[in-house]
Amino acid sequence: MFSAAPEPAAPGSGSDPAPSARRRETRNRLLDAAAEVFTEAGLQGATVEQVCSRAGFSRGAFYSNFSSKEELFLAALQHQYELRAAQLTRRAEQLIPHLQECNEPLQPAEVAEYVQEFLAPVDAESAWFALETEFMLLAMRDPEIAPPGFAGFLDALKSELAEVVEKLVDAAGRRFILPVERALAVFDGLYDRAARLAALSGGAVSEGSEELGGRITELLFVITEEVE
């Protein structure tokens, strides 16, 4: 069903010239439009025409960037992952100075507020979760739908987020007592639950979202220790 999306060329490989700014803009507009259309209609219900119309481009612009609707779907999912990771990284950069300025050890209630702020929903949050959920359902039916390198992309993304989380914990004067990757896997479970409840409530702030900061903080104080 899926055609494998081509892997990006390595920097300096000389296989393909770097895309122009105009081409990157066209691709990003198609990816943003695809995220909206796929979220509304799903992979099977969405059409190339709908994506092109939403982005304001012709079919020619689409096929100069993607070979199929399925390739676009995977690229849109990857794009949403990247946007989410970039947003969390920016928030961490803003929070770290505030954490470092605290003279006294942070108490759970304070940490919960910081966690809630860090994980607050971003624009198109529902699109990210909807695309990921559909991808997981497709993968259950066809384990080979992901293109070559997709698993490596996800691993690299997780490592990047693990580094961000570790820096935040360090700025708060604490350190993990187990590998941060294991902690992140548990945090992911709590976050996914909150995202799922929010999606089921039509995107409104759900009970799970409101409790997310407190739940993660409880766990955080168990699997980290204060740095003396």
Image (cartoon, rainbow, N blue to C red):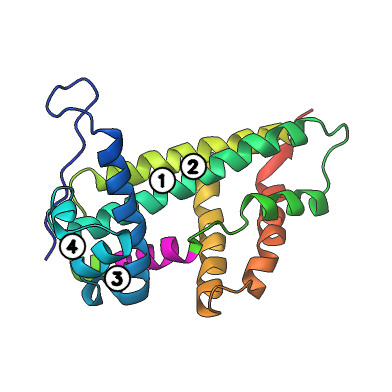
Assess whether mark 4 and mark 3 are in contact (beta carbons under 8 angstroms): no
In the picture, measured across the screen, residue 89 lies left or right of residue 25, that is right
**Amino acid at the residue labelled 2:** Ala
Residue that badge 3 annotates: 137
Q: Secondary structure at mark 2?
A: helix
Assess whether mark 2 and mark 1 are in contact (beta carbons under 8 angstroms): yes
Q: Nearer the viewer, mark 2 or mark 3?
A: 2
Residue at 81% from the left image edge and 49% from the top image edge: 110
Q: Nearer the viewer, mark 4 or mark 1?
A: 4
Residue that badge 4 annotates: 69
Q: Main secondary structure of the magenta part?
A: helix
Q: Secondary structure at mark 1?
A: helix
- Please identify the quadrant where the N terminus is shown: bottom left
Numbered range of the magenta stretch:
126-137
Residue at 47% from the left image edge and 66% from the top image edge: 126
Q: Position of residue 108 (x, y in %)?
A: 80, 51
Assess whether mark 3 and mark 1 are in contact (beta carbons under 8 angstroms): no
Assess whether mark 1 and mark 4 are in contact (beta carbons under 8 angstroms): no
Residue at 37% from the left image edge and 38% from the top image edge: 156
Mark 1 → mark 3, Cα distance in angstroms:
21 Å
Residue that badge 1 annotates: 82
**Amino acid at the residue labelled 1:** Glu
The quarter holding residue 56 reads bottom left
Mark 3 → mark 4, Cα distance in angstroms:
17 Å
Q: Residues within 10 Å of mark 4 (few under 14, many from 20)?
A: many
Mark 4 vs mark 2: which is more N-terminal?
4
Mark 4 → mark 2, Cα distance in angstroms:
25 Å
